């Protein structure tokens, strides 16, 4: 059969229509790609064209409560290479390797990478001198970029609290780690559009995304007090060469940590120079040991709150030991303190007297108060690695355990627990959570992002009981074992502690942690200071001898630093033959020479002026001075 | 012999318009590359201009050569092309470019035998089918001999391998056989067999399979098999309705490899947008219409089939090329007629148009 011409024509028409249809489908597809997929593809294309040069965010500063910088940033040059711009990789590697003191092969590896920009890790955060040297080499394709490095202007000061940050400015320890997320900012970048060879495409604008700098962290620390504490610790270190020292200063009325330090310490910039256990352990919150007599404050507060004792009226006879459950517990003083009021029991830190108080309370009450004061649990301070301490399990507490606990033996507590508990005992009875970070502030806007407020956990004792505790502890310093902490006019109260160190279940000989916890002024405590010295050498190991004077010094200077007014009224210091007694300067105004001579038997006079009548004197009347001090008077012609 | 009249002016205008767009686009797409590689942004544009000039001269020459001449030479041309296709497979004679041994000759005087085979096959099939039209409805006497010849050529081309050119050639020949009056049910059966064979070819070569999978999800391997497709889509996508403006393409900046050849339509869509792309498709549609019109008006069946074969080749090549560029079908290396850079492709296309123009001179309309 012959195919007709009509068939050919028909089929040609079919082919034409089919062809046009296929073209139409292709055009629809083109429209679909350009309109329906357009935005998605444009975004992907932009991602593919854009090159990001990272802009590091500035890590937030850490400052004290007055804005003094404790941890800040220092510019640190870093070496970068742009491999495409390096013509002679071999020579460049050689020169750079020599300058950075690394193997040439390593540098060669960096600068021949198929990347637009390579950071030379061995050239990170180098000194400015080194950077200058490398710049002077004038190597093509090698750049020095600005990076920042953590800088601690005070060196080892507050090092355990601050911790340190690593090479990528990441917090590794201490507050730097605890608040790492907040201190860290967000990286920014300059985005420029480049062709596939990495060169800029001129017809597209750059896109700058500013880095968001990290938040500044303001602490409750007062660098003035911290400086005083650090100084005293340095002195004690030099004097006693102890195994360690722990110091905490806290505002008892809200839980703000004002100062915290310990020895041995380290320089955050060179933390690798000390063993890890030194920088890993922030002793004031980490360590846990037998508190000794400082713990008696808890027993005292409990007994007062429960009305089990009247300090003035109740009396106690201490024969030097007490028999409990068949065991003989000794007082620290050989032969005992004899007959004494319970106030004197506190002043003398008499162990059998506190065993008696513990007995009057009973184990349930005693341990309830210990728990209420926060022992046996973490205080919740915003620092890493807080310890819990060890308490007797109540079901296992027999007469001996109850007795030793009452005077601070056989339990294990952390320094921060003691500070928090004693603060509660003297601040009117409220237990606060200690804290060290006060605010997080946006460095650009100055806006406060986070502000911590004091957290009151619970009321432990009444206001009246707290006042009684303060009175008793002030008398400990004025008249008892804490005399070395006495500060004229600032009404220091406190308690000594001397704890034996246990090792392998036995107490060590001649190896004590001597401590003192003090507060001032006793009428309205503004500061609680705790000092513990571990195994001081060349001294009698008593808290009253070693730790009390350190607290006294810290208290005296800190009261001035905190602008606390000296008090007029105080429990006067009971003098011993060792002390020079203090006398009040009499009012000499208007006296004549004869009267002056009669007045002054324990002070010296420096008289100036000619007349016969005192018209001015220094120091002014009522001031306390040491016996035998010089009083200057000015005399004029009287009528 | 019928009297010659004027050639199809519309076909001529459309061809020149496409050629002009192609020259501009080759320059725009290749300038960055040319500057980078040869420090001369006009490197490719100048050469394309020369190819175009040579092509136009050849086209006008062929326009005046009676198309019956090709019937006389068709057999010889096909034989020569078969020989060349065999020669090109011999290592040392055939040169490998982009993974295919499809070039023969030295330097600038290299040719692709498969390109010539496309035209030779069209000429031969037009002669064969017009002479054996009586037998075309017979499976054994008409269909089988013509198809055998086509598939032998296809097999040789696939040995290079060059799936793109092979597919265009087979597609063109199938259209010609269809036009000549082959039975529809023969086609249906052969279509099924062909599809199965095609699938087998794809599965047999891992790189073809990869092209299929990367076609289905180019982002699965964006730097490997999906690379070209992604870069092409990343060019077209941001183009939008009006495009980024002539010369403003970003993808030509080394992202899309050799943007002046197979993927020139992507750059065109990026710079001139949907409107530019549609305009080019419209021009090709007009070309198709004029081609079919010439086939309809040809004084004999041989002329009809020759015209139809030529225009089918152009159209199929356009469909495959733009289909690939827009992600409609898997990546197959094939040029866009009149627009892509490339000497053999351009001159052969213009010569084919020359044949079309000659046929149009004998049109009955």
Image (cartoon, helix red, strand yellow):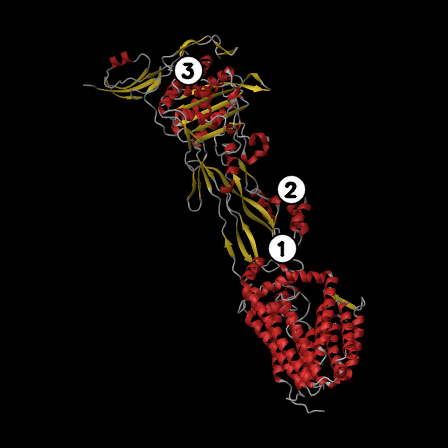
Work out how far the residue at label 1 is from the one at label 3, CA to CA, in angstroms.
80 Å
Q: Is residue A214 visible?
A: yes
Disc 2 secondary structure class: loop
Image: A429 above or below B278: above
Reading the image, the residue beneath label 2 is: A101
Q: Earlier in the sequence, mark 2 or mark 1?
A: 1
State the separation of the CA atoms marked 3 and 2: 65 Å
Task: Kindly indicate the quadrant of the structure image that contains residue B297.
Answer: bottom right
Both on one chain, marks 3 and 2? yes
Front of the two marks 3 and 2:
3
The front one of B122 and B25 is B122
Q: For mark 3, what is the residue?
A: A347
Give the Cα distance between marks 2 and 1. 23 Å
The residue under the point 61% across, 45% down is A121
B113 left or right of A35 in image:
right
Q: Chain of mark 2?
A: A
The chain identifier of the residue carrying mark 1 reads A
Tell me which numbered mark, 3 or 2, is placed earlier along the sequence: 2
B324 vs A160, nearest the viewer: B324
- Whole-percent x and y of residue B224? 67, 58
Where in the figure is residue A450, as x and y percent of width and height? 43, 41
Task: Of the two numbered discs 1 and 3 on the same chain, state the one appearing first in sequence.
Answer: 1
Q: Residues within 10 Å of mark 3 (few under 14, many from 20)?
A: many
Q: Which residue does the image show at 41% across and 29% down from the upper left? A: A458
Residue under label 1, please give it: A85
Residue B41 visible in the current orientation: no
Question: As drawn, is A27 to the left or to the right of A632?
Answer: right
Q: Chain of mark 3?
A: A
Task: Between label 1 and label 3, give the one nearer the viewer.
Answer: 3
Question: Is A321 drawn above or below residue A267 in the view shown?
Answer: above
In screen coordinates, is A341 left or right of B91? left
Name the residue furthest left.
A639
């Amino acid at each position: 059969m012959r195919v007709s011409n009509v068939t050919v024509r028909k089929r040609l028409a079919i082919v034409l229509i089919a062809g046009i249809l296929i073209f139409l489908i292709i055009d629809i597809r083109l429209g679909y790609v350009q309109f329906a997929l357009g935005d998605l593809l444009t975004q992907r294309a932009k991602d593919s064209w854009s090159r990001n040069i990272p802009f590091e965010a500035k890590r937030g500063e850490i400052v004290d409560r007055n804005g003094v910088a404790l941890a800040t940033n220092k510019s640190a040059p870093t070496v970068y290479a742009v491999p495409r711009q390096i013509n002679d990789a071999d020579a460049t590697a050689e020169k750079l390797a020599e300058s950075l003191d690394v193997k040439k092969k390593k540098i060669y590896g960096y600068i021949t990478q198929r990347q637009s920009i390579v950071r030379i890790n061995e050239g990170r955060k180098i000194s400015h001198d080194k950077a200058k040297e490398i710049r002077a080499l004038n190597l093509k394709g090698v750049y020095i970029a600005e990076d920042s490095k953590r800088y601690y202007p005070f060196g080892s000061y507050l090092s355990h609290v601050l911790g340190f940050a690593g090479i990528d400015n990441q917090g590794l320890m201490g507050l730097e780690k605890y608040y790492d997320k907040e201190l860290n900012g967000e990286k920014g970048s300059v985005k420029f559009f480049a062709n596939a060879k990495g060169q800029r495409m001129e017809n597209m604008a750059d896109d700058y995304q500013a880095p968001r700098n990290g938040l500044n962290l303001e602490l409750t620390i007062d660098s003035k007090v911290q400086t005083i504490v650090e100084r005293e610790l340095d002195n004690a270190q030099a004097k006693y060469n102890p195994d360690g020292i722990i110091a905490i200063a806290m505002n008892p009325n809200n839980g703000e940590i004002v100062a915290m330090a310990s020895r041995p310490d380290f320089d955050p910039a060179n933390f690798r120079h000390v063993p890890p256990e030194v920088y890993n352990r922030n002793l004031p919150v980490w360590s846990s040991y037998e508190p000794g007599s400082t713990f008696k404050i808890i027993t005292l507060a409990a007994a007062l709150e429960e009305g089990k004792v009247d300090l003035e009226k109740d009396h106690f006879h201490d024969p030097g030991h007490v028999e409990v459950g068949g065991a003989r517990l000794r007082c620290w003083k050989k032969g005992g303190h004899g007959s004494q009021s319970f106030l004197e029991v506190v002043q003398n830190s008499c162990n059998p007297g506190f065993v008696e108080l513990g007995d009057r309370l009973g184990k349930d009450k005693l341990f309830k108060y210990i728990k209420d004061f926060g022992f046996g649990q973490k205080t919740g301070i915003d620092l890493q690695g807080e310890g819990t301490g060890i308490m007797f399990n109540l079901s296992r507490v027999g007469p001996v355990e109850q007795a030793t606990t009452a005077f601070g033996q056989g339990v294990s507590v952390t320094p921060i627990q003691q500070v928090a508990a004693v603060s509660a005992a003297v601040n009117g009875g409220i237990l606060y959570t200690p804290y060290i970070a006060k605010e997080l502030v946006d460095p650009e806007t100055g806006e406060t992002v986070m502000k911590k407020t004091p957290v009151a956990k619970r009321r432990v004792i009444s206001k009246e009981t707290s006042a009684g505790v303060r009175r008793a502890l002030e008398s400990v310093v004025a008249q008892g074992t804490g005399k070395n902490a006495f500060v004229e006019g600032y009404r220091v109260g406190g308690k000594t502690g001397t704890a034996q160190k246990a090792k392998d279940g036995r107490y060590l000989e001649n190896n004590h942690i001597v401590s003192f916890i003090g507060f001032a002024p006793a009428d309205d405590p503004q500061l609680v200071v705790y000092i513990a010295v571990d195994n001081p050498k060349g001294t009698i190991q008593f808290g009253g001898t070693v730790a009390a004077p350190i607290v006294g010094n810290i208290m005296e200077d800190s009261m001035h630093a905190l602008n606390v007014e000296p008090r007029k009224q105080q429990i006067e210091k009971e003098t011993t033959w060792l002390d020079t007694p203090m006398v009040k300067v009499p009012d000499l105004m208007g006296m004549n020479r004869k009267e002056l001579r009669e007045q002054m038997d324990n002070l010296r006079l420096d008289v100036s002026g000619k007349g016969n009548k005192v018209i001015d004197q220094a120091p002014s009347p009522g001031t306390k001075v040491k016996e035998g001090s010089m009083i200057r008077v000015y005399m004029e012609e009287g009528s | 012999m019928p009297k010659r009249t004027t050639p199809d002016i519309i076909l001529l205008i459309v061809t020149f318009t496409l050629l002009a767009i192609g020259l501009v686009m080759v320059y725009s797409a290749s300038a960055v590359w040319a500057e980078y590689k040869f420090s001369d942004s006009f490197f490719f544009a100048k050469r394309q201009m020369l190819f175009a000039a040579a092509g136009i001269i050849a086209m006008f020459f062929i326009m005046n050569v009676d198309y019956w001449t090709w019937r006389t030479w068709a057999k010889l041309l096909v034989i020569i092309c078969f020989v060349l296709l065999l020669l090109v497979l011999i290592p040392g004679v055939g040169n490998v470019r982009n993974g295919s041994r499809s070039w023969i000759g030295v330097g600038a005087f290299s040719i692709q035998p498969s390109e010539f085979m496309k035209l030779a096959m069209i000429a031969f099939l037009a002669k064969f089918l017009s002479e054996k039209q009586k037998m075309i409805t017979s499976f054994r006497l008409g269909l089988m001999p013509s198809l055998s010849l086509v598939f032998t050529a296809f097999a040789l081309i696939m040995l290079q391998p060059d799936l793109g050119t092979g597919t265009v050639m087979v597609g063109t020949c199938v259209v010609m056989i269809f036009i000549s009056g082959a039975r529809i049910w023969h086609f249906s059966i052969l279509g099924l067999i062909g599809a199965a064979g095609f699938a087998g070819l794809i599965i047999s070569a891992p790189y073809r399979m990869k092209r299929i999978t990367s076609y289905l999800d180019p982002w699965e391997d964006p730097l490997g098999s999906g690379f070209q497709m992604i870069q092409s889509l990343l060019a077209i996508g941001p183009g939008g309705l009006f495009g980024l403006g002539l010369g403003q393409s970003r993808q030509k900046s080394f992202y899309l490899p050799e943007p002046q050849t197979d993927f020139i339509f992507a750059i065109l869509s990026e710079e001139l947008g949907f409107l530019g792309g549609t305009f080019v498709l419209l021009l090709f549609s007009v070309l198709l219409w004029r081609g079919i019109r010439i086939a309809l008006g040809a004084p004999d069946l041989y002329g009809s089939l020759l015209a139809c074969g030529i225009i089918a080749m152009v159209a199929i090549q356009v469909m495959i090329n733009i289909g690939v560029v827009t992600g409609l079908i898997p990546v197959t290396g094939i040029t866009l007629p009149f627009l892509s850079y490339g000497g053999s492709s351009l001159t052969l296309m213009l010569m084919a148009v020359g044949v079309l123009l000659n046929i149009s001179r004998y049109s009955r309309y």
